[in-house]
Structures are given as structure tokens and as C-alpha cells.
Amino acid sequence: MSSANAKRNKNLPVLIVAVLILIVLVTGIIYELIHQNTPSQERADIGKLYPVEEGTAAIISNGVLSESRALWSSQRAYLALSIVQNELNSRFYWDETEQILVVTTANEVATAGLETMMEEAPVLLRQEDGTVYVALDYVAQYTNIQVDTYTNPNRVFLRTQWGETTTAGVEEEGQVRTEQDVKSPVITDVSPDDRVTVLEQGEDWSTVYTRDGFVGYMQNSQLTGLETVEDPGPYQAPEYTRTTLDGKVFLVWHQVFEESGVDSLNSLLENAQGLNVLAPTWFSIQDEEGNLESRASHEYVEIAHSRGIQVWALVENINIEGVNAVELLSVTSHRTNLINGLMAQAEEYGLDGINVDLEELPAEAGEGYIQLIRELSVACRQRGLILSVDNYVPSAWTEHYHRAEQGVVADYVVVMAYDEHYNGSEPGSTSSLEFVRQGVEDTLQEVPAEKVICALPFYTRLWEDNSGVVTSSTVGMNEVQGVLDQLSQYDNFSQEWMAELGQTFAQADRSSGVSCQLWVEDEASMEAKLNAVAPYNLAGIGGWKLGMETDGVWALIADFLQNGNQ
């Protein structure tokens, strides 16, 4: 035997071993690949997937299992009212005093109590700790949500996001799994006759919702016939339609006390130009039950209408002391009584609108207040009345007036751009340029411009400092020149146009040692304010109050609304 053959025979066992090892390795790799890619048939523990205690239900919100749980009673899911209000529909209002749930839409005020039934089950449940729960299918009657309930285990699929919906079928039997892995447990099977809702599409896997109420993952290779359609959701809320004037609003309040104001109306309007809305202060809230004191007059309305002027009668809470605003506004029967009284007055006197001016409300009255505006808007909308709501300039301490919601439900939102400094404050302007501009800009953050009326003062204040004791008195525009003439007779008199304030500042010292200051409101200051708000193209201008203006102010505002507010 040659040395070459001997060497070859000697290496043969090594080669055979190497081949065998290679075969084993390849076989192992093939087995592992087959094993890794062979779908698991392990079934998921549904009880662990949707863990619930007795009397509760799991919530799958937009495909994601929530940590919160619904109550489960009579095959119906109930959600805590606070969650409904904060996350689903803020227009669900709970009256703790009368134990009533009030839901307000653009054209309906619906109520439900603890005894109210729906399909032989209560709409509301109240737990021992006082927590109120509301049936989700009742919520769905007024809210754009999808509510599907299932048993074994109890669970509710809740969808709140809309725009598009994607569905898909399967060519062969498909499986929904707990994870994006074929080795993960199977939640449920999908037959070729079924379609699934695709909640989220990934590169290889998609999150799906099945007809039997499960959410999990399917391989995209199992899905077929994907179809995406526009989907606005199952509930379309009634539209908040508006009643408005044809053009810009020029509103002036007419303050009246013991009488209607009719005796002086003709003389007050003698030189008025461009005015198209009068808001007489006719209705004062007398008590917590919402009863009204009325000073309305048929003759007044007739005079206004004969001049082409609408009447939006004002309702207020500042001329009657002792009315508890929280009790007035939070109790449903009290709000209803107030609204019914206003509607009866509107019908009796042929009013064109209601102007709401509830001031100095405590924060705890805020929810009841905006609920009043919602309910009043429904009553006004049904009768073709214009609803306007008066507001302070926005600030942290007036957030509870809910301007953004006013901007949805009311026809006009008025920003009262005055009382920057007021009786009892330190001396200063009643309505400086920056105060007006900022008040309008902040209001526009919440309310569309086509609804905003900027109200400006026809008055200012004469400030007097007597050895540190500061007092002030109201001075109408029509009195300002006389006050300036008087101040000019005192010591150290001076007056200067302050461009940054948009008004003249005057001061003088009396011989008695009293220091006087006056931030003038006149035609020049009014023109500066109008120019400041011109870029915002607002719905109109208001003025407080009738009888304090000068004749030139009428022409200024009328010309501005016709030509300059754009």
C-alpha cells in the first residue's frame, strides 16, 4: 500500500465523524427552525388575560386594557360618573341635591334619577361610598362611543377615537395571540367567514379586535381584503346652531332700577347712531329658587323695535343680596325655574334675546353656572332667541366661568374690558389699551372671534387720595370735560396723553391737601381702543352704559363696525 493510500485511509474516520457532526448540526438547526416557526396551539388563560372580580368588568379602551374596572350588573357595564365626565362627555351633570343626572345636547335636556330604568335595568347605580355609576349604553345615547359587552369573563370594549376604520378577513383559519410571536398563546380563532377590526397595523403583525370581543395580535400574512373606510362614529351630536344679527353687533346696556327705563328711552336714543341692541337690566334673581324680579315693559320694546333695535334683556345677580349662588345654580329645579321664568318674560314682552350677567360667582358654583348656560341655550335655541353671556377679562380666578364651553353653546360671548381698576383698588385706568388687548386675545384662545363682543366703558373714575385714604367716584364720558375744567383750577394741574395707555392722564392737588387723579375716557380713548381690537375682526362692540356716552362716541363705534372692524 502506498503511503498516500495509507494516509487517506487514516483520515477517513475523521471525515466520517465530521460529516456526522455536520449532519447532526444541520438536523438540529432544521429542527429548531421548524420548531420556532411551528405555531403554538397553547390556549391563553382568558381569566388571567382579563382579570376581574365578581360584579366588575374589564375595560378595553381603544384596544388597550385599562387599569380601571367597570361595575357589572344585569348584564350591563357601568362606569364611574366622574370618569364619564372627565374622559367621555363633560356635559353629563350630576345634581347631588336632587340626585339627578342631567345630560344636555344642543336641543335637549335629558334627566335620569336613581330610579330611572332602561330595558329593565337602572340607568344609575350608587355605591355605599356615594360613588355614582352610569350605564355605558346610556352614555352612548349622547356620546360618540362604541360600547360592546361580553361575558366569560365580563368585559367591555370601548372605542372613543374615530376618523377611519380598517377591517380585514382571513383566507384560512386564523389565530389571535397574546403577543407578536407564533409561540405565544392563542386567545381565539378567526374563521374565514369572520372579519376583524384592525386597530393598529405593524410590519409583520397587526392588533385586531374580533367579533367575539377579544383584542390581540394576528400575523399580517393571515389577513386578507383589508378595507379602510371613513368612520365618524355611531353618534353624531346635534349641531349647536346660532341665532345672530345679520351684521356686527353694537350693544349698549341700559341700567334701570325701580322702573323699566321707558320714560327716558327716547331722549337717551335721540343721537344714537348704529346701535342695534339694547340690553336693559330688567331681571334680578331674587332667591335661590330662581324666582325673578322683572321691570320689563311692552312700551320699551315697542320703542326699540320701532328704531330697528333689538332687546336682549339682562338677567343679573348683583342687585339682590343674600342669594346663595351655589344653591341657585347647582340644583336642577332652581335652574329650571329660572329658565322658565326668563322664557315666559321673553314671550310676554317679545324679547329678541337674553343677556346673562352673573358676577362674583365662587369657584364652587362654576359647574352649576355652565350647566345653566347649557340649559338656557337649549331653551333660547328652541325659541329663536339670542343668548349672550357677559364675562370678566380672563384670569386665573375666573376660569370656572368656562368660556370655552360658552363659546360652543352661546350665540355671543361678551368680554367686559373695563374695571381694570375699580372702587376699592389702587388708583389706575378703568380700561387701558393693554388691558383691552390682552382681554380680547385671551378670550380668543377659547372663543371664536365671530362670537366675541368687546364691551368698552363709557365712564372712568376720579381718584382722590386724602392722606392715604383713597376713594373714587364714577365719571361718565359726558361729564369728563367738566371734571377736567374743575381740576384745572387746582394746584399742580397737569394733563398728558399717554400713548401706551391710549388715554389722557390728568392730576391736580386741592388746597385741602387731597390729591386727584383721572385716567380720561373720551372719544380719543375710545378710538384708540377700537383701533387696538380692529385686527381681531370681532363680532361687535358693547358699551356700559347708556346715558354716559358723548354724541361723538356713537359715530365712532358705528363707523368702526361698518368700515374698520376687519
Image: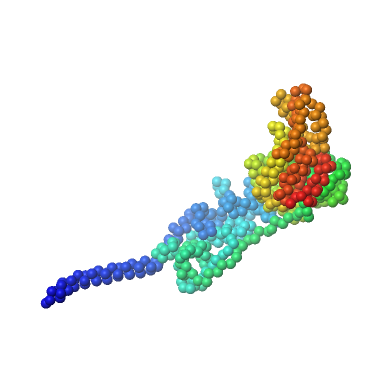
Total labels drawn:
0
Percent x, y for residue 462? 76, 32
- Which quarter of the figure has residue 394? top right
Percent x, y for residue 491? 78, 25
Against 22, residue 128 (above or below) is above
Q: Which colour scheme appears in the figure? A: rainbow
Q: Nearer the viewer, residue 21 or 68?
A: 21
Q: Is residue 127 left or right of residue 426?
A: left
Percent x, y for residue 538? 73, 50
Percent x, y for residue 421? 71, 35
Q: Residue at x 56, y 55 (%)?
A: 78
Q: Residue at x 55, y 46 (%)?
A: 129
Q: Is residue 24 left or right of residue 254?
A: left
- Which quarter of the figure has residue 419? top right
- Which quarter of the figure has residue 521? top right
Instruction: Work out whether residue 135 can be spotted.
Output: yes
Q: Is residue 47 left or right of residue 237?
A: left
Q: Nearer the viewer, residue 498 or 520?
A: 498
Q: Nearer the viewer, residue 295 or 450?
A: 450
Q: Is residue 265 left or right of residue 321?
A: right
Q: Nearer the viewer, residue 342 or 197?
A: 197
Q: Residue at x 50, y 57 (%)?
A: 64
Q: Residue at x 59, y 54 (%)?
A: 88
Q: Quadrant of the N terminus?
A: bottom left
